Image (tube, rainbow, N blue to C red):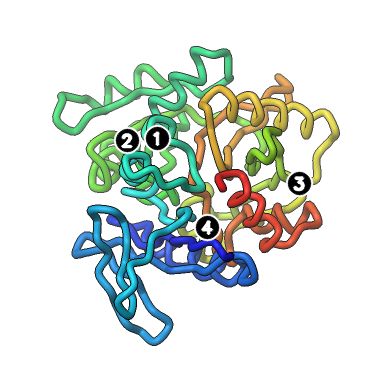
């Protein structure tokens, strides 16, 4: 008998646009011989099942069910394709934990910690993972751009502390521009992280668990095009960067990044597929962790699908591995 899978998309943030693109890819590649897939669109105004004929049916949030033609549909598992809140910050994970429904992502505690960039690097640094020096700012507390600049070496990255897709992020090379960049980031989030730039090559790597084994995918090197300051939202989704998969790197770099990624996966008690971003400083022969994405993009432009193909797998096989792990 086929399993009933709820594919979650949408969301309450600016990342909803990417969530819908991810859901298209996931739905197209879930094995129809094994799963009946129901797309659930979660928005501020309501939670709805989107039928193939364009119909919308309200989700009963008391038990996360829908009623179709008089039949109440209970789901065997949830495939989370929702980036940002509430699908990546632990809120939905806690809800599904309460209902006893398994899902394809990290648990509520891990999701909440890793969604907060500052808490993520703090836990990592405490456990011996190399990270950049940074300053954490709160919107409702006093802060001073001059004082922040005095604690860090330029250039720095200024970014909303919660969220992804590099929305609201800036690179600052002149302290005179720091105030403007911080205010821009506060326009997206109540907390801001100002972080020293690490010199080196940017790599990102997918990591997941299958049958108890932590597995890394072939890593990707990210290069923003000339004139593009860094890998921001535009570089990610408007073709203004090169993503080289698999990355052209030495065996030593591959080994160091992969070992760090597996250590981080275990340290944060991760589940499902995550993607970890690193800067690799070749002089120190050391990867510096930037952030952890617990619901990485699955759209046609996303990195994890590139890495799955580079491993010689198709997405149908890969998504089945993720569902097998929780079913």
Q: Count residues near mark 1 (Cα–Cα under 10 Å), then give few for <14, some for 14-19, many for 20+.
A: few
Residue for badge 3: 247
Residue for badge 2: 178
Say which quarter of the image contains residue 303. bottom right
Q: Secondary structure at mark 4?
A: helix
Q: Earlier in the sequence, mark 4 or mark 1?
A: 1
Quarter containing the N terminus = bottom right
Q: Report, in whole angstroms, how far the alpha carbon at label 1 lies from the one at label 3.
A: 32 Å
Residue 281 relative to residue 275: left or right = right
Q: Residue at x 56, y 61 (%)?
A: 240
Above or below — where is 224 with respect to 148?
below
Residue for badge 1: 174
Q: Count residues near mark 3 (Cα–Cα under 10 Å), then give few for <14, some for 14-19, many for 20+.
A: some
Q: Report, in whole angstroms, how far the alpha carbon at label 4 lies from the one at label 1.
A: 22 Å
Check whether the beta carbons of the residues at disc 4 and disc 1 lie within 8 A of each other. no
Q: Residue at x 71, y 54 (%)?
A: 308
Residue 95 relative to residue 7: left or right = left
Residue for badge 4: 235
Pinpoint residue 312: horizontal percent, then vertical percent: 81, 56
């Amino acid at each position: 008998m086929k399993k009933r899978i709820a594919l979650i998309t949408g969301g309450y943030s600016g990342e909803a646009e990417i969530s819908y693109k991810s859901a298209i890819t996931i739905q197209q590649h879930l094995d129809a011989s094994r799963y009946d897939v129901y797309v659930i669109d979660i928005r501020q105004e309501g939670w709805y099942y989107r039928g193939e004929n364009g119909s919308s049916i309200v989700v009963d949030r008391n038990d996360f069910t829908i009623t179709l033609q008089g039949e109440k549909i209970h789901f065997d598992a949830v495939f989370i394709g929702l980036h940002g809140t509430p699908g990546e910050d632990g809120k939905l994970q806690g809800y599904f934990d309460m209902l006893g429904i398994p899902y394809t992502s990290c648990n509520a505690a891990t999701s909440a910690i890793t969604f907060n960039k500052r808490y993520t690097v703090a836990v990592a640094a405490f456990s011996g993972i190399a990270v950049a020096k940074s300053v954490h700012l709160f919107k409702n507390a006093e802060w001073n751009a001059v004082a922040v600049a005095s604690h860090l070496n330029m250039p720095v990255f200024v970014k909303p502390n919660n969220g992804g897709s590099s929305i609201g992020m800036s690179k600052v090379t002149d302290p005179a521009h720091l105030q403007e960049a911080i205010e821009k980031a506060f326009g997206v989030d109540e907390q801001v992280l100002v972080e020293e730039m690490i010199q080196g090559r940017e790599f990102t790597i997918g990591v997941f668990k299958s049958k108890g084994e932590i597995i890394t995918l072939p890593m990707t090197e990210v290069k923003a095009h000339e004139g593009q300051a860094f890998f921001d939202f535009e570089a990610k989704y408007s073709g203004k960067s090169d993503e080289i998969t698999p990355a052209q790197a030495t065996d030593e770099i591959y080994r160091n990044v992969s070992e760090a990624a597996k250590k981080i996966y275990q340290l944060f008690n991760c589940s499902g597929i995550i993607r970890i971003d690193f800067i690799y400083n070749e002089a120190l022969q050391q990867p510096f962790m930037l952030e952890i994405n617990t619901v990485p993009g699955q759209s046609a432009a996303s990195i994890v699908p590139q890495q799955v193909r580079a491993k010689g797998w198709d997405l149908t096989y890969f998504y089945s591995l993720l569902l097998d792990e929780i079913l």
